[in-house]
Image (cartoon, rainbow, N blue to C red):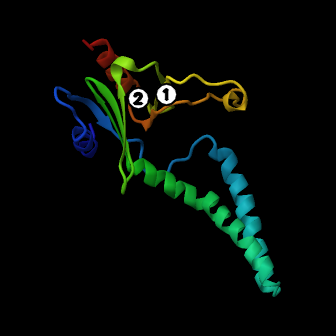
Amino acid sequence: MDNRAYRLIEQQLQPHESILWAGQPKQGLLLQRADAIMIPISLLWGGFALVWEYLAYRQGAPLFFMLFGAPFVVIGLYMMVGRFYFDARQRKQTYYGITNQRVILLSGARQQHVQSLELATLPGVSLTEFPGGSGAISFASSVPLSGGLGAMSWPGVARFTGPRFNLIDNSNKVFRILRDAQRNLP
């Protein structure tokens, strides 16, 4: 059990509540499935924007052309590098906990966001395992999906509708702890 996660979750405990598990998502730079598409796209976008700015500057183009390209350079830099930094930073500030009564999700550095889900009223729990033993535990939303465009998704892509423990190690073990806690409720 992660000591820092344990201490932070402990601060959220109510009387007669005990921690069964506490942890964090995987840390550091992580490549995910979507990056197989996003990395080439970001390199094309960022490369084009940088070449545009370079040529506009080098050829003495009017200020409008350099200013026009600037937002595209910023977006390109974010797509190429920034998104990895912000993702790692967000995961570093995220903590998960399972108690004998609730699931607790903490996030944020300056402003802490606490989400608490009662085990007795969780409408559904599912486990998605990734190679290497890590995975995600999703807590289904109690709000049904409405019809129309809001309910559409790409074929073959699961639609996520609620909070989850994302990128946790030993996800199968954590899932068993959660299911046992639900079964042991009074």
Frontmost residue, 174 versus 185: 185
Q: Quadrant of the N terminus?
A: top left
Q: Which is more N-terminal, label 2 or label 1?
A: 1
x, y percent for residue 95: 35, 42
Residue receiving disc 2 = 171
User: At 69% across and 30% down in the image, what residue appears?
Assistant: 153
What mark, if any, has residue 129 been given in the picture? 1
x, y percent for residue 58: 78, 85
x, y percent for residue 43: 70, 59
- Confirm or deny contact between disc 1 and disc 2 (CB under 8 A): yes
Question: How far apart in space, not on screen, are marks 1 and 2 (Cα)?
Answer: 7 Å
User: At 33% across and 38% down in the image, what residue appears?
Assistant: 23
As drawn, which residue projects farthest toward the left?
16
Frontmost residue, 170 versus 115: 115
Task: Locate residue 12 relative to residue 118 in the image: left or right.
Answer: left
Position above or below: 160 against 56: above
Position above or below: 81 against 172: below
User: At 45% across and 51% down in the image, what residue appears?
Assistant: 90
The quadrant where residue 61 appears = bottom right
What kind of element bears circle 1? Answer: strand
Task: Locate residue 166 relative to residue 180 in the image: left or right.
Answer: right
Frontmost residue, 151 versus 170: 151
